[in-house]
Amino acid sequence: MSKRLLRLHRIVPDKIRVGRSSFYSGVQPRLWPKPVKISARCSAWPEDELDEIIRARAAGARDNEIRQLVDRLERERDKHPVHSHHRTALEHPSRGSAEGKTRCVR
């Protein structure tokens, strides 16, 4: 299971061949999981969750099945939250955290 968190610019178009707004429009109807908040201005998605949804879509899962999968993945995420040591890959190595604020870089 991957603990990597991907920012939107790494998901679209590298992993998912849709536009940014199309990806975001799939979050509300539960076709994609909600992002993990890294800081007040930074969000990311667990790579393993995205990979599982992509595999389900490739296998022919319908939207209602994808919604059930997203619900399950988010429930599991709530049981095992992403801790700060998993977020360090998103921080710039020379900047890190300043004044107690996590910086999120592209």
Image: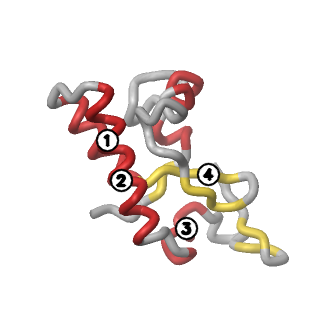
Q: Which residue is mark 4?
A: 43
Distance between mark 1 and mark 3 Cα atoms: 27 Å
Distance between mark 3 and mark 2 Cα atoms: 19 Å
Q: Is residue 89 left or right of residue 77?
A: right
Quadrant in the picture for the N terminus = bottom left
Say which element carries label 4: strand
* Sequence-wise first label, 2 or 4: 4
* Label 4 neighbour load within 10 Å: few <14, some 14-19, many 20+: some
* Sequence-wise first label, 1 or 2: 1
Residue 63, x across and y down, in percent: 32, 26
* Label 3 neighbour load within 10 Å: few <14, some 14-19, many 20+: some
Residue 3, x across and y down, in percent: 39, 64
Residue contact at pointers 3 and 4, CB within 8 angstroms: no
Q: Picture quarter containing residue 20?
A: top right
Say which element carries label 2: helix
Q: Which residue is mark 2?
A: 73
Distance between mark 2 and mark 4 Cα atoms: 17 Å
**Mark 4 belongs to which amino acid?**
Ser
Q: Nearer the viewer, mark 2 or mark 4?
A: 2
* Sequence-wise first label, 1 or 3: 1
- Residue drawn at x 67%, y 58% is 104
Q: Report the number of discs.
A: 4
Distance between mark 1 and mark 2 Cα atoms: 9 Å
- Residue drawn at x 78%, y 70% is 101
Residue contact at pointers 1 and 4, CB within 8 angstroms: no
Say which element carries label 3: helix
* Sequence-wise first label, 3 or 4: 4
Q: Is residue 64 left or right of residue 85?
A: left
- Residue drawn at x 74%, y 52% is 41
Q: Which residue is mark 3?
A: 87
Residue most toward the left?
59
Distance between mark 1 and mark 4 Cα atoms: 23 Å
